[in-house]
Every structure is written in structure tokens, then in C-alpha cells.
Image (spheres, rainbow, N blue to C red):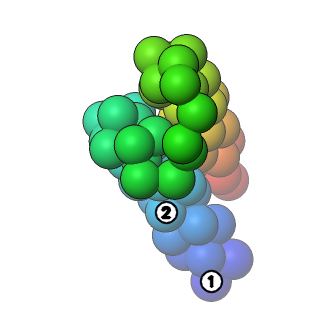
Amino acid sequence: MWQVIVKLIATIIILSGVTLVFDARLITKKYFGFGDQNEATDGLKIVGYIVSIIGGLMMYFNW
């Protein structure tokens, strides 16, 4: 039972990371109003990539 719960949580984490990577430009335009959106978009993509890797590692090392 514990393994199923951890896999579901890891899947949700991976999904949120992938969403951050692919929708970074739209999220930046919607929530952040400062001038340089390219840096904010790059930052969100990096964060999304790291979050996806963390979720993948949780899924991989789930015993």
C-alpha cells in the first residue's frame, strides 16, 4: 500500500515539473509582472526540470 501511495505522489510531482517546463512562458506572463520575462521563464524551466528529476528518482528508488 505504501508503494502505491509513493508512486502516486511521485507521478504528481513529475507531472507538475513537466507542466512547469512546457508552460513556463504562460505562467510567467500570468503571475509575474516584471520586465524581464526571459529570465523568469528560464528559472521556471530549471525548477521544473529539477522537480521532474526528483519525482523520477522517487519513482525509481521506491522499493
- The numbered disc on residue 18 is none
Q: Residues within 10 Å of mark 1 (few under 14, many from 20)?
A: few
Residue at image point 55% right, 44% down: 32
Residue 56 appears anywhere in the view: no
Residue at image point 69% right, 77% down: 2
Q: Where is residue 54, by image quadrant?
A: top right
Which residue corresponds to mark 1?
A: 1
19 above or below 56? below
User: In whole angstroms, how far apart are the C-alphas of marks 1 and 2?
Assistant: 17 Å
Asked which secondary structure carries label 2, the reply is helix
Name, please, the residue furthest toward the bottom: 1
Which residue corresponds to mark 2?
A: 12
The amino acid type, in three-letter code, at marker 2 is Ile
Viewer-closest of 42 and 35: 35
Asked which secondary structure carries label 1, the reply is loop
Residue at image point 51% right, 69% down: 8
Residue at image point 53% right, 25% down: 35
The amino acid type, in three-letter code, at marker 1 is Met
User: Which percent across, then down, holds residue 20?
Assistant: 44, 42
Residue 48 appears anywhere in the view: yes
